[in-house]
Image (cartoon, grey):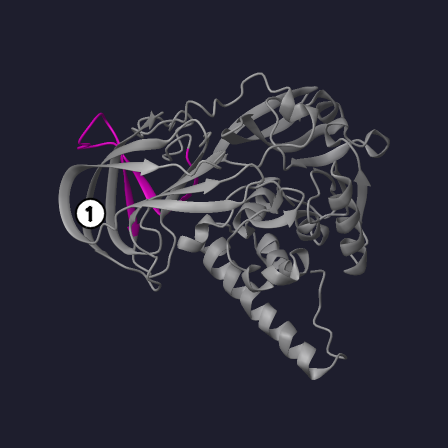
């Protein structure tokens, strides 16, 4: 699976059976990775609310280190999006587990996946369903994924290179369809190829404001449920270019920075993704009716929110950042960089990380006050990710009324 964009920001914060017949050194390596997988599932997946035992089992079995480059194997079992080439990423394990659990995979299901990427999502589904049909529009990625899935003997995964939004008509209908790229609306061929009663999971929305939507087909129509916010990297080709609503890199903005909106009533603030250990509080806010409260008791544990934005550093020289904060008994985490604060990560036109800027750290205890800071923007910047929270630290952090104003 690809497309999920968290880059490496969380750093601040299998059909495989072990091959006992191989050499002892490789067996030790297999045992090492198996231990990392178990830790990954316990901490990032089960620990974050994924409950389906079959999904948890598959996540423990699929060798995620086989789906990343050799230079990134040491990060394969962290909850990170990692680059896989062609300006794409492999999704964090939690996102893969969340999407898999959400479509409720059954043993006799035929599943269509749009956006093969590394092949990791298809591999996770392989042990849970009868057949997986997966399509990748980027030829290089598609060929690599097909070879990888064949080598690892995921024999019930069938690959194709082409436009995923056209679906796979000769294999339709499908019980489940899972989409890992984000259009503005559901492509009609996917609706047509979904079986009656079938389920479709897709991220929809604007370039930096996407939400998972779950659809079920009833009498030819899609019954709709809005789920959690998410952020996927731009699609490849005309679909991205033809977006009706495009971000303006000359007008960077934060959406729902006052944390007032929860349209779907899930008690999570809208427009912010990858929310971890954060409560939406609707009483005694310093401004308006709501604020966010981050709480973490485990050093190194993630307690944060993220939001992306377009920004042209060649035109926007700096940003004025302002927010209301209060904190209680906050302490640095395991690593020196794991401190409560506001972080903005800058990326160039090929999504290479070119630096960060910070507000904080917020250590100790302090009642509500407003903090402001002017942050310079690297000229090469074309997009940015805002990260806000305890970021691996412990204690309680409260945040309200985040504002960003550009300085040309």
Expressed as whole percent of the image width and height from the top left, the position of residue 12 reads 40, 54
The residue that appears at 60% across and 49% down in the rendered structure is: 83
Left or right placement of residue 374 versus residue 139 in this view: left
Q: Which structural element holds mark 1?
A: strand
Q: Judge by depth and name the residue closer to the eye, 174 or 300.
A: 300
Q: Is residue 272 above or below residue 47?
A: above
Task: Identify the residue at the far top of this view.
Answer: 244
Q: In the visual, does 313 lie left or right of 35? A: left
Residue pointed to by mark 1: 327
- The percent coordinates of residue 202 (x first, y second) are 60, 32
Instruction: Residue 306: name its quadrant.
Output: top left
Furthest residue in direction left, as rendered = 367
Q: Position of residue 94 (x, y in %)?
A: 52, 49
Residue depicted at 44% across the width and 32% down the height: 313
Q: Is residue 260 above or below residue 127?
A: above
Residue 209 is left or right of residue 111, and the answer is: left
Front residue of 239 and 329 = 239
Q: Residue 2: x percent and y percent?
A: 63, 43
- Which region shows up in magenta? 272-295
Residue 282 appears in view: yes
Nearest the viewer among 285 and 7 is 7
């Amino acid at each position: 699976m690809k497309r999920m964009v968290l880059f490496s920001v969380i750093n601040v914060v299998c059909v495989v059976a072990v091959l006992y017949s191989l050499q002892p050194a490789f067996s030790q390596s297999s045992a090492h990775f198996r231990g990392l997988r178990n830790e990954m599932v316990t901490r990032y997946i089960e620990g974050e609310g994924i409950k389906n035992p079959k999904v948890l089992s598959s996540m423990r079995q699929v060798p995620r280190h086989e789906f990343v480059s050799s230079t990134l194997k040491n990060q394969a079992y962290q909850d990170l999006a990692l680059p896989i080439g062609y300006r794409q990423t492999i999704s964090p394990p939690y996102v893969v587990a969340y999407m898999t659990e959400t479509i409720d995979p059954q043993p006799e299901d035929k599943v269509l996946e749009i956006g093969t990427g590394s092949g990791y999502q298809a591999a996770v589904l392989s042990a849970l369903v009868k057949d997986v049909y997966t399509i990748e529009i980027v030829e290089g990625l598609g060929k690599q994924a097909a070879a990888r899935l064949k080598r690892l003997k995921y024999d019930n995964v069938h690959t194709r290179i082409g436009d995923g939004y056209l679906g796979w008509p000769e294999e339709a209908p499908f019980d489940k369809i899972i989409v890992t790229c984000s259009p503005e609306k559901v492509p009609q061929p996917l609706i047509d190829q979904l079986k009656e009663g079938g389920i479709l999971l897709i991220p929809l929305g604007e370039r930096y404001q996407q939400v998972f939507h779950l659809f079920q087909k009833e009498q030819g129509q899609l019954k709709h449920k809005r789920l959690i916010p998410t952020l996927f990297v731009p699609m490849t080709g005309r679909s991205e270019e033809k977006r009706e609503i495009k971000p303006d890199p000359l007008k960077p903005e934060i959406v729902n920075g006052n944390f007032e909106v929860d349209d779907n009533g899930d008690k999570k603030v809208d427009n912010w993704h990858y929310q971890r250990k954060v409560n939406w509080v609707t009483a005694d806010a310093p401004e308006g009716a709501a604020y966010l409260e981050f709480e973490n008791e485990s050093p190194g544990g993630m307690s944060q929110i993220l939001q992306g934005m377009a920004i042209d550093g060649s035109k926007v020289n700096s940003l004025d950042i302002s927010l209301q904060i209060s904190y209680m008994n906050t302490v640095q985490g395991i690593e020196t960089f794991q401190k409560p604060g506001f972080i903005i990560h800058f990326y160039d036109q090929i999504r290479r990380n070119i630096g960060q800027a910070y507000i904080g750290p917020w250590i100790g205890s302090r009642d509500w006050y407003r903090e402001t800071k002017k942050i310079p923007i690297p000229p090469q910047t074309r997009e940015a990710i805002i990260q806000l929270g305890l970021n691996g630290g412990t204690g309680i952090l409260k945040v309200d009324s985040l504002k960003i104003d550009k300085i040309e």
